[in-house]
Amino acid sequence: MNKGLIPSLEKAFRCQVLGVKPKRNVNLLKTDRGYWIIKGYKDQEKARWVTELAQALREKGFLHTVQYVSDTGGSAIFPYGDRFFTIMKMIDGQEADNSSLYDVKKTAETLARFHLAAQGFPVPHRSYAYEGTPAMLDKWESRLEHFERITWTIDQNGPQNRIEQIIQQMAEHVIREGQELLHNAYKLPLTPEMFMAMERGTLAHRDVASHNFLLTNKGNCYLIDLDTVGHDLQIVDLVQLMSRMLLMQEYRLQSFVEAIEAYSKINYLSDTQIWMVHQLLRYPDNVLREITGLYNNRPGYHMRGVQQLVQLEGKLQHQRSMFLEAGDKILQRSPWGNYHFVG
């Protein structure tokens, strides 16, 4: 952090900074007014979006999210140099643990409350998010294509390390699963979901990783990091959440049912929506996300962690298959109960 920034912050926010500690892509500030999180943006519009969004969500009753601190002039954005800084009050909580069903249900409830508040945001110029196919499917197709290029290179050069040996062993199965889902996803009733999202002006978080949920000692759960929020189908968040947690829950059907119930008690899901979530989980997103993230050198993706996750997916392949075949047990009376994937 630029040392000249601190005196400017102290003047603008009428505080005394007692210490600074880096944390992921932000910095933790210890001040005489409490603990704050400071984050810098290159784009002023992005900084404006997250601060105004947080305020709008709070006005709609969703209080379990970030709260920004304004300077003496009433602004939540502090320009300094070529960046635009925001300051949030630190939330005293622990990151959610997807291996804990209690944590999973709390995150599902919090996501449901966020989705209720994240409606009524007019879609500007019939947003690109609703043109053609859902953005999630476009992203998945691109991710699969990248994975295929990675596997082709490994086949040409031979595996250079343990992770590439694992990729080579899993490649055929992963590619087949990905292609089957992308082929059959267009048979799912996603178009009505897109129109409903457009009419309601819904926002999705689009990065519901466990570290973006903080649980406090009082049992409250907060959803943080609004940078990725945008106009989209909210079902994409549910698919993300279920995909990530099911791996740590060893693909137990009961964990899925309880998490869906926790969400649906707050934000009602129809049988059709639940069925779509279950079917979309056929896409092997955990493996593809981690491997392409590693090869793209994305922040947070490291060789050891990716290898452990991919190996765990391989170990749980049978449990995953059993879960994906259990659709009839989830929705005995679903109007989509006769729907089956070919493959």
Image: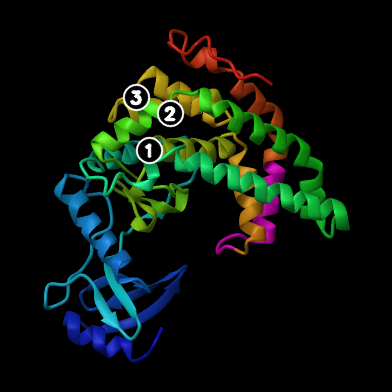
| Disc 1 residue crowd, few under 14, some 14–19, many 20+, Cα 10 Å | many
Q: Does the image show residue 100?
A: no
- Do labels 3 and 2 touch, CB within 8 Å? no
Give the x, y percent position of residue 15. Answer: 20, 82
Per the image, label 2 sits on a secondary structure element best described as: helix
Image depth: mark 3 or mark 1 in front: 1
Say which element carries label 1. Answer: loop
Alpha carbon separation for disc pair 1 and 2: 9 Å
Occupied quadrant, residue 219: top left
| Residue type at tag 2 | Leu
For marks 3 and 2, the one nearer the N-term is 2
- For image coordinates 46% across by 40% down, the residue present is 241
The image quadrant where one finds the C terminus is top right
* Marking on residue 269: 3
Looking at the image, is mark 1 or mark 2 earlier in the sequence?
A: 2
Q: At x 64% / y 22%, what residue is drawn?
A: 322
- At mark 3, the secondary structure is loop
The answer to which image quadrant residue 232 occupies is top left
Residue 170 in view: yes
Question: Is the stretch drawn in magenta largely helix, strand or loop?
Answer: helix
Q: Could you tell me how far apart the alpha carbons at marks 3 and 2 are, in whole angstroms? A: 14 Å
* Residue 131 located within the stretch drawn in magenta: no
Magenta region: which residues? 298-312
Please name the amino acid that badge 1 sits on.
Answer: Leu
Dot 3 crowding, Cα within 10 Å, few <14, some 14–19, many 20+: some
Disc ID at residue 190: 2
Mark whose residue sits in front, 3 or 2: 2
Rendered residue at 31%/76% (across/down): 84
Decide: few, some or many residues near mark 2? Use Cα within 10 Å; few <14, some 14-19, many ≥20.
some
> Closest to the observer: 316 or 187?
187
The residue to which callout 1 is attached is 233
Q: Name which of mark 3 and mark 1 comes first in the sequence.
A: 1
